[in-house]
Image (spheres, rainbow, N blue to C red):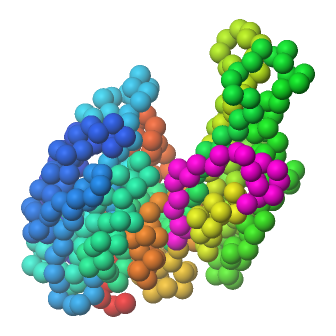
Amino acid sequence: MDDIFAIIEERKDVYLEWLTRICRQPSIAAQNVGMEETAQMVVEFLNGIGANGRLVETDGYPFVYGEIGGQSDKTLAFYDHYDVQPPDPLDLWESDPFEPDIRNGTFYARGVSDNKGNLIARVAAVDAYLRARGELPVNVKFIFEGEEEIGSPNVEGFAEQHRDLIQADGCIWEAGYCDTTGRREVYLGVKGILYVELTARRANVDLHSSMAAIVPSGAWHLQRALQSLKDHEEHILIGGFYDSVLAPTDADRQALRTMPFEEDGKRTQLGLDAFINGLTGEALLEQYVFQPTCNIAGMWSGYTEAGLKTVLPHEAKAKLDFRLVPNQDPHEIYDLLVKHLQAQGFGDIEVELLAAEHPARTPMDHPFTQLVIDTSRDVYGQDPIVYPLAAGSGPMYPLCQKFGIPAVSIGVGNENSRNHAPNENIHLKDYYEGIRHIAVIIDRFDSL
């Protein structure tokens, strides 16, 4: 790999310029800011390395797709996204979010960690490999989405309509970070999500609160419905909710034992005396990684401004998100939720489905998993931290596991990359090492 690493070193300034150029270009999907320009820019990057970049239209923002043939019939795919979060609040940024700034070896810009740094690192790795060897050992596909930050509403349709484009023997997913000691992290999957909005109504209009003596409250009605979802020990009471949950394997438990988690520091940081049910150690990590959740993301009703207003709310709303684990189906969980509310006497509450994503994971003992772990150890000089399942969610299932494609997530972020927050950043050393890691994976992928 010395010849490829030498090219990466020689072209460090070029790859930095690529990263600067794409981070300077806003691409805020939620506000339709710069999306067309960014998609075209990504196409140009792919065309610049001979990947025949093109736009694949969806009902929303297009995918950017490209591919390069290799010496074998094995195919390695890269999934990333070119959209970013809004930069607000602007006053907390130390530099312009769309005018990249390098301070003490750290690159600051909106989207550099999530996800443009990873996107460009993969393009750069292929560029360096081709310049050093003239040909790739395997086929490579680039699958770049433009709607990840708004819930990936068109991923499933894209995958179903373009099965030929997504087929691969393995996929490097969008992101990865390191812990406070610099150990890289490898993620083998994501939790699914069910996001709903509940609406409870009693009277047909808000009333003077004196009417609370005889008129039922939408707020109390919703509160009682929410109370029926979990007991005091945080056990979810929806019938059948846990039926499909898989127990951790022995390999999963071994991975839990190697995960660093500074319990005392985290509790202090959050101002907590204890975690849920007093959990600690391996039991705490098992709950965090392998158990589903039922969370109230927001709730509102009646008068919430300053001062007094004596009102009886006729309506109350709440947003709930359920983080799901293999093999839970978000649509089945939605049906179970509706049935539960009906059975508990809350059948009149509206349940609006806002988002649904399946959980997804690649087994610990899969050859692709081992390839990524082994190459990470070789590039970074130490064993990575392996997470059998990330606590967050993403559209991994409809692009990968649904079609039998293993996916593993790695990237160039750090322990304080501040995704979605002001002063988003990556360290330049992580960026260049990430390019080298992708190049090594390409080199060894045919051995699977």
**Quadrant where the N terminus is found in the figure:** bottom left
Query: In the rendered view, does 136 fall on the left or right side of 291?
Result: left
Q: Residue at x 24, y 44 (%)?
A: 35
Specify the segment rendered in magenta.
339-360
Q: Residue at x 71, y 8 (%)?
A: 307
Residue 151: % across, % down: 44, 52
Residue 309: name its quadrant. top right
Residue 230: % across, % down: 80, 53
Q: Nearer the viewer, residue 185 or 354?
A: 354
Q: Nearer the viewer, residue 373 or 164?
A: 164
Q: Is residue 109 visible?
A: no
Residue 23 painted magenta = no
Residue 311: name its quadrant. top right
Residue 340 painted magenta = yes
Residue 169: % across, % down: 35, 84
Query: In the rendered view, does 165 fall on the left or right side of 156?
Result: left
Query: In the rendered view, does 302 fall on the left or right side of 3?
Result: right
